[in-house]
Each structure stands twice: as C-alpha cells, then as structure tokens.
Image (cartoon, coloured by chain):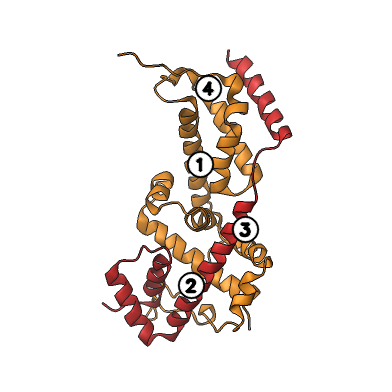
Amino acid sequence: MKLTCDEATTICDKSQYNEASFLEKIKLQLHILLCKKCGNYSKQNGIMSKCYEKKRAYDSDKKKCLCKEDKKAMENNLKENYNTTK
Amino acid sequence: MLTKKNILNPKNWISSHADYLYNYTITRVNNHDLAKDLVQETFLAGLKAMENFQGKSSERTWLISILKRKIIDYYRKINSAKGKAEVRMNFYTDGENEGDWIEERAPSDWSSEIDKSIENDELSIVLDKCIDHLPEKYAMVFRMKTIQQFETEDICKELEITSSNLWVIIHRARTQLRKCMEENWFKK
C-alpha cells in the first residue's frame, strides 16, 4: 500500500494526462499527506503542465513544411534512383 | 466483385505526398534534417519495393507504412545508443533509500510570481532547451505524448513499447524537465 517517492511521482505524472486510476490517486494523496517533497512536486507538476500547454499553443502556430529546394533535391534523388532501378 | 486497384506513380510522389510525410515525421522527431532524411529514405525504399505493392491500399497509406518502419528503426537506434545524454537519476535506485528523492534533485520552493512568468513568451524557448537536453528517446516520447497529445495506446503501438515502459519514460522526462525549469526559470 505504501508508495515510494519514485512511485508516487509516477502516478502524479500519469494523472497529468488523466490516466491514473482511482486507487492510484488515493494512494498518491495519502503519500502527499506525509511527504512534503512530493507535495511540492505535485503542485509544481500542475504548473509544468500549464507550461507544456503554452508551448503546445506556441508550436502549433508555426507551420512546418518542406521548402522548394528540399523538394527539388528529393525529386532529383528519386529520379536518379528510378532510372537505375528500371 | 469489382474493386479499383490502386497503382503507384513515383513521378508524382514528391508533389503528392512529400509534405504529408514530412509533417507526419516532424511531429515525431522534431528535427528538420532528420525528418527530411527519413522521408527521402521512405521514397527510395518505396521505389525498391514497388513490385510488392498489391494495390489494396492507397499509395499514401502504403508509403506511410514504410515510413512507420523507418521511424521505429530510428527509435530503436536512439534507444540502444549508449552514453552521451544520460538521463539524470532523481531517485535512489538501491539501498535502504530506494525510491526516495535524491536530496539535490528534490523539488524546492518556486517563486510566488508563477502566473506572470508563465505568460512570458520566452518560456517556450527555455522549455525547448530543456527538452533538447533530454536523451533523445525521452524527448521523442515526451513530445509525442505531451505536445502532440497522441494516445498512450497509439504511441505504444507505433514505437512497439509497453505502456509501463512509456510511463517510466514520461516520468523521467518530466522529473528532469521540472528540475531544468527550476534552475532556469522558476528559481526564487
């Protein structure tokens, strides 16, 4: 029943994605009652999730694609190989 | 029964599929040159394997299935690569303290002006640096799960890992990132 800090923080990480089970969450809460470090971790983990969410929004604004030169180079490479395999 | 048989047309591969394959790859490996190379390799492998194409799936689906193999191969490679960016241990792994926080890795208190500092755009840049400091495989799984928000099951299937394996990786990535952000951003 008793968790180590390593196990408790693993559950805490899981719960950031809503993937911790009910029992796990209870165990985590019990652990946090007695462990200040993990209590701190748990609080900060929520803040970290907010940071990741910010970053996610920031990243999705940037559009990523191949530029013309990249495609041209691929095209040439493909052609060369196409001719040799034929 | 009449079914339309799909055919392959390598002459149009770049114009029809390059961007799609590139986007598929970049969300997983997050490095332009590497993603470009993987796409290129996929096209070349496709050329070589053309006679194996049975026309049951679309051209794009077929190319994606080749690309998926390339990505798994890449993941295996970084997974077995030793040395270099070792993940820092945050907990004792043996002895009577097994599973306890290693003192200097344990969370310390953060500045009280957290909300303001989260709104700062520079945060993303610092966070990116922290993610880049992770061993590559941790960064890859972490990004897929947290930034791309793929389902656990899908990541496991794609990279051929178990879910407990995935959580160990996410846990190590997150404890390491917390520490990195504590040192570089949230320090009191």
| B3 lies left or right of B129 | left
- What's the amino acid at mark 3? Tyr
How far across and how far down the image is residue B42, in percent?
55, 31
Which SS class for mark 4? helix
Closest to the camera, between mark 1 and mark 2, is 2
Q: Which residue is mark 2?
A: A46
Residue at left offset 52%, top offset 80%: B107
Query: Among the chains, which one is orange?
Result: B
Image mark for residue B150: none
Determine the CA span between mark 4 and mark 1.
18 Å
Image mark for residue B71: 1
- Tell me the subunit letter for badge 4: B
- What's the amino acid at mark 2? Gly
Image quadrant where one finds the N terminus of chain A: bottom left
How far across and how far down the image is residue B129, in percent?
65, 62
How far across and how far down the image is residue B122, in percent?
69, 66
B53 relative to B161, above or below: above
Determine the CA span between mark 3 and mark 4.
39 Å
- Mark with earlier residue (4, 1): 4
- Does the image show residue B84? no
Closest to the camera, between mark 3 and mark 4, is 3
Determine the CA span between mark 1 and mark 2.
31 Å
Q: Which residue is mark 3?
A: A58
Asked whether B171 or A12 is in front, the reply is: A12
